[in-house]
Image (cartoon, helix red, strand yellow):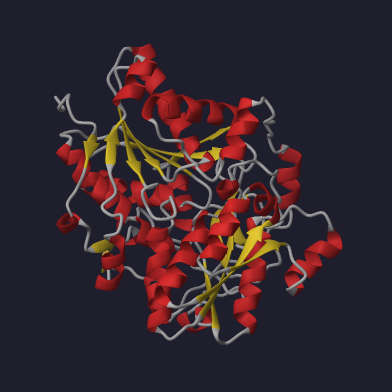
C-alpha cells in the first residue's frame, strides 16, 4: 500500500534525466512521412533547413530511442527541474473518493508552464548554429514567453506573432515577453503577406494559431538570418518534453504507486506527450498497463471531431504536410480562454497513437472546466492555467467514477502551468459570463473540405 504521509515527491538534481525519450522506435506502426507542400513527396533535411537548425532537423527524423540532453540545457533546467510531483490528498478528501490522485506540476518554471523544456533546447541548438533571430507564434502566450526567456538567455532576438484574441485577453503575457526583450504582434498583422491576405478576407479576424504560424514561417523563410521555432506538434518538441514523464516515473516509484490512467490536456500535444510518452513506453514494452487520456476543448475538438488525414500546419499552406487529426487548416475556433488549446491539428505522433487506440480522447465545455479548476484551487491551493484545467476536469471525473464504483483508482495528470496570468478568465467564470461553445459539425465539415488531396506516397 502506498505511504499515507507524503504529499510532495521531489527528486534531487542528480536525478535530472540525462536523455530525452524518442517514442518512434516503440510505435506499433511507423509514422507517415512528412510531405513537401509543393511536390507532395517526402521531405528531406535540406527542405527543412530554411526553418530549423540541422540539430533539430536530425532530432525530428531520429529513430534513436534516447537522445542525450546537452549539459548547457541541463544546467538551465536545474533552475526549476526536477519539478515536483504532488499527491492531491486535499482534493481526494473534498471529492470523498477512494482514488489516489497525483499531479506533476510544471508551473514551477520561471514563466509558469512546461514550455521552457523545449524553448531552452531550441534556443541552444539555434545559438550553436550561429542563429541570432527566431520567429514564432503563440496562443495564450505560454510558448511566446518561454521562447522570449530562452532567447534572452542565449542572446537571440525573438519575434512573436500572438493570436489576436489572446493578445487582448492576456496583456500581461505580452508584457512578460516584452520584458524579456521580444517583439510581439497581434496576429493577423499587416507585416506579412499571409497576414494581409487574412485581413483582406476578414478585417475583424480574431486570429488563430494556424494564421500566426503562417506569419512566423513567412518571416523565417524570407530572412536568411532568421529561423522558425514551434512550441508544440513537431516530433522534436514532444521529444524535449519527455523530461516530464521520465521524472514522473521516478517519482511514482518514490510514492510506491503506479497510475491506472495518465491524463494531459491537448492542444498541439506537447505537455500531454511529455508526460504520457515515457508511460506509454512502459505500457508497450514492459507490460506496465495503463490508460492514456487526452483532454481537449469542445470548441476545438481536433481528435474527437477531426479526421486523420494529411493537412498543412498553417492557414495559408506554407508548411509541410503532416498526417494528423485535423479540423482543417482553415479552421478558426471561437475565442475561448484556453488559448493554448485552439490549434486545428494534433501532433502527428499523438495522432498516430490515438488512431491505434492507445490514447483515448474526450472534450469538455469551458464552464465545467473552470468549475473543476476552482474546486482544485480551493483544495490544493494552486490555480491552474485554463489549458491545464482541462486535465483537472478529467481527473476529477475519473475520481468521481471511482467513487461511484467503490473502487480504488490511481490517477496521474500533468498540471502543465499556473493560471496567474489568466485571472480575467476566472473572473468571467465567477461572474457567470463564460459561454460554452461547441463548434458546429457543419463548420468542421466545411473546414475539412479544403483538406489537400494526397496521392499514394512513395518513399525511396
Numbered circles on residues, count: 0
18 lies above or below 275: below
Judging depth in this view, the residue of 374 and 215 nearest the camera is 374
Q: Residue at (46%, 71%) from the top-left corner?
A: 151
User: How far across and down, in percent of the image, does residue 77 sit?
Assistant: 30, 61
Residue 37 in view here: no
Judging depth in this view, the residue of 459 and 256 nearest the camera is 256
380 lies above or below 322: above
* Residue furthest out toward the front: 179
Q: Residue at (35%, 47%) from the top-left corner?
A: 275
User: How far across and down, in percent of the image, does residue 181 sit?
Assistant: 53, 70
User: How far across and down, in percent of the image, does residue 411 sit?
Assistant: 32, 31
Which of the 4 image quadrants contains residue 93?
Answer: top left
Question: Which corner quadrant holds the N terminus?
Answer: top left
User: How far across and down, in percent of the image, does residue 47 sit?
Assistant: 53, 81
Judging depth in this view, the residue of 363 and 154 nearest the camera is 154
7 lies above or below 57: above
Amino acid at each position: 500500500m502506498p505511504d499515507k504521509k507524503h504529499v510532495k515527491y521531489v527528486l534531487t538534481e542528480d536525478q535530472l534525466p540525462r536523455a530525452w525519450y524518442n517514442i518512434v522506435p516503440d510505435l506499433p506502426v511507423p509514422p507517415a512521412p512528412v510531405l513537401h507542400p509543393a511536390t507532395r513527396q517526402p521531405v528531406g533535411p535540406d527542405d527543412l533547413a530554411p526553418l530549423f537548425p540541422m540539430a533539430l532537423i536530425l532530432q525530428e527524423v531520429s529513430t534513436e530511442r534516447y537522445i542525450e540532453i546537452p549539459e548547457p540545457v541541463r544546467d538551465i533546467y536545474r533552475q526549476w527541474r526536477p519539478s515536483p510531483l504532488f499527491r492531491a490528498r486535499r482534493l481526494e478528501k473534498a471529492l470523498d473518493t477512494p482514488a489516489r490522485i497525483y499531479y506533476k506540476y510544471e508551473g514551477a518554471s520561471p514563466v509558469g508552464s512546461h514550455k521552457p523544456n523545449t524553448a531552452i533546447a531550441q534556443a541552444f541548438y539555434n545559438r550553436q548554429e550561429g542563429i541570432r533571430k527566431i520567429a514564432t507564434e503563440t496562443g495564450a502566450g505560454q510558448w511566446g514567453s518561454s521562447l522570449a526567456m530562452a532567447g534572452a538567455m542565449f542572446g537571440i532576438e525573438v519575434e512573436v506573432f500572438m493570436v489576436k484574441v489572446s493578445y487582448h485577453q492576456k496583456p500581461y503575457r505580452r508584457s512578460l515577453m516584452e520584458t524579456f526583450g521580444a517583439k510581439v504582434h497581434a496576429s493577423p498583422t499587416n507585416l506579412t503577406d499571409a497576414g494581409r491576405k487574412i485581413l483582406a478576407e476578414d478585417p475583424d479576424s480574431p486570429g488563430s494559431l494556424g494564421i500566426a504560424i503562417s506569419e512566423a514561417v513567412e518571416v523565417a523563410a524570407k530572412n536568411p538570418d532568421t529561423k522558425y521555432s514551434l512550441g508544440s506538434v513537431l516530433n522534436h518538441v514532444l521529444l524535449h518534453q519527455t523530461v516530464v514523464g521520465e521524472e514522473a516515473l521516478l517519482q511514482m516509484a518514490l510514492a510506491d504507486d503506479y497510475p491506472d490512467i495518465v491524463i494531459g490536456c491537448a492542444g498541439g500535444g506537447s505537455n500531454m506527450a511529455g508526460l504520457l510518452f515515457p508511460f506509454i513506453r512502459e505500457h508497450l514494452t514492459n507490460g506496465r498497463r495503463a490508460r492514456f487520456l487526452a483532454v481537449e476543448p469542445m470548441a476545438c475538438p481536433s481528435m474527437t471531431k477531426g479526421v486523420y488525414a494529411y493537412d498543412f500546419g498553417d492557414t495559408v499552406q506554407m508548411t509541410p504536410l503532416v498526417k494528423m487529426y485535423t479540423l482543417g487548416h482553415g479552421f478558426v475556433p471561437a475565442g475561448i480562454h484556453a488559448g493554448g488549446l485552439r490549434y486545428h491539428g494534433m501532433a502527428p505522433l499523438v495522432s498516430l497513437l490515438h488512431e491505434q487506440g492507445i490514447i483515448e480522447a474526450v472534450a469538455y465545455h469551458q464552464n465545467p472546466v473552470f468549475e473543476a479548476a476552482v474546486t482544485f484551487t480551493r483544495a490544493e491551493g494552486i490555480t491552474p492555467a485554463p489549458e491545464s484545467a482541462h486535465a483537472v476536469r478529467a481527473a476529477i471525473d475519473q475520481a468521481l467514477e471511482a467513487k461511484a464504483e467503490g473502487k480504488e483508482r490511481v490517477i496521474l495528470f500533468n498540471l502543465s502551468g499556473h493560471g496567474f496570468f489568466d485571472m480575467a478568465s476566472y473572473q468571467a467564470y465567477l461572474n457567470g459570463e463564460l459561454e460554452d461553445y461547441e463548434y458546429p459539425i457543419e463548420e468542421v465539415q466545411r473546414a475539412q473540405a479544403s483538406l489537400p488531396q494526397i496521392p499514394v506516397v512513395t518513399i525511396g
